[in-house]
Image: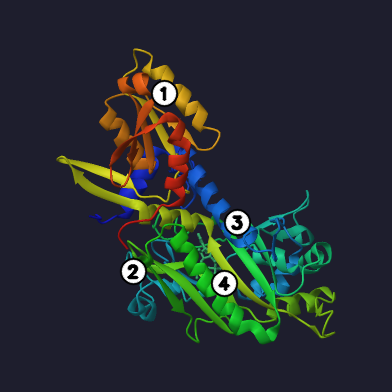
Amino acid sequence: MEADVTMDKLVSLCKRRGFVFQSSEIYGGLSSAWDYGPLGFELKNRIQSFWWREMTQLHDNIVGLDASILMHPRVWEASGHVENFTDPLVDCKRCKLRFRADQIPEENLEKLECPKCGGQLTEPRNFNLMFKTHIGPVEDDGSAVVLRPETAQGIYINFRNVLQSSRQKIPFGIAQVGKVFRNEITTKNFTFRTCEFEQMEMQYFIHPSEDLKWFDFWKQTRIDYYEKLGIRSGKLRFHRHSADELAHYCRDAYDIQYEYPFGWQELEGIHNRTDYDLKRHSDYSGKDLSYLDEVSRERYIPYIIETSVGLTRTVLIVLLDAYDEEQVEGEKRVVLRLHPRLAPVTVGVFPLVKKDGLADMAREIAQSLKEEFTTFYDQGGAIGRRYRRQDEIGTPFCVTVDYQTKEDNTVTVRFRDSMEQTRIRVDELAACIDSGVKAYERVGQ
Ligand code: ATP
């Protein structure tokens, strides 16, 4: 049965096996910045590709974009970020720690008393979360730019370009994945909230009269996506923004929340942003961003339904959701029950022993599987140990070559979740793994 996953267990596995490392570790670490190691990078890439497939490839009317991180400063005036992208912060005058005013206990805020040392806090001040830098050699106001805090604005300002070049008609969407930066007060929850992270966003441009229909469509499509990703449905829920949470330009907004070890928190946001964004960019740029329906001859500013999720936060929930421990023959087995589509290694290939030509046969099989699957060859240690090492990184299939292979060209395939083993012919191996990936179903919701 599922054992409770804690953040400590996950952080330790991630470091031990090369999923995620603390940034700048050899210099004592940079707080809230993380590096993705060999396996973490693979996992992140697979999640990104899966999202891309689901959000563009499966829809004729959704196209991609890769906008730059640095944009004209007016973009952030038009978007409202210069004015509103702030957190209320309080500083402790004694211990110098800084807190988000909305994240400390209410009595501390009322008394302006530091929750760590009891010292006096400053009154809350609004602090803009955008990182500032300069373009070119002169550091003056004219050269100031910010690192984008979301990918969405790069999509809105290219609305006309995409519309004209791709001949899309409303409804249509533009999808983008990329790095964003927010100078946040971060909590200690590993990669949950970081100053630098990646977002996967899709902005869907629609006729204003169809907003309810498309909002419901994307809510449903996005929750279904997590099931395809192998996430247990019991760990996900919708949270509708109350009137005081709702951004002033949003008509309706839902978060998809995940139950992290530290409680239910946001994973993704789905927002009905109305015509706010294109109207603002029309006003600020002086360019007409309206749309002309060629059939009805109606001209209007499209509404936007946005789906926005953190890629790095998705990596975190995929790992948390997959982590499991169980007792097997008196020993603890740590297993990542990753969907085989996402597992960094799909097939482990082992010779039972190195000698008598078994290693060569196993290498040859591993090589032939490489065309289609990510494989890992391992000849070190007892076979049980080798299985455990693959379980811990979520490898769904292991293939073992033994003496019988020499006689009848069959191998053992061992399945990660059930630990069942079956004997099949080498020439059936690729098809067996392929159908195992496609037919995978997670047990236990
Ligand atoms: P919060 O209110 O928690 O700061 P937000 O509502 O501002 O977050 P959005 O701007 O809607 O978040 O961002 C969309 C998605 O980007 C979030 O659902 C989350 O998955 C991810 N995200 C936001 N901030 C961070 C962060 N600091 N680190 C990692 N991922 C983040």
Tag 4, which secondary structure?
Answer: strand
What amino acid is at disc 4? Thr
Question: What separation in Å lies between label 4 and label 2 (alpha carbons)?
Answer: 22 Å
Mark 1 vs 2, N-terminal side:
2
The residue tagged 3 is 52
**What separation in Å lies between label 3 and label 1 (alpha carbons)?**
34 Å
Q: Can you say whether 83 is above or below 364 in the image?
A: below
Give whichever of discs 3 and 1 has the lower sequence position: 3
Q: Nearer the viewer, residue 186 or 354?
A: 354
Query: In the rendered view of the protein, which quadrant contains the C terminus?
Result: bottom left
**Label 2 CB sits under 8 Å from any ligand 1 atom:** no
Mark 1 vs mark 2: in front: 1
Whether label 4 touches label 2, CB < 8 Å: no
**Could you say where residue 238 lies in the image, as x and y percent from the top left?**
44, 75
Residue beneath the point at 83% across and 81% down:
295
Disc 1 marks which residue? 362
Q: Amino acid at mark 1?
A: Ala
Q: Which residue is mark 4?
A: 86
Instruction: Choose mark 4 or mark 2, whichever is in front.
Output: 4
Residue at screen point 48% across, 73% down: 255
Residue located beneath label 2 in the image: 115
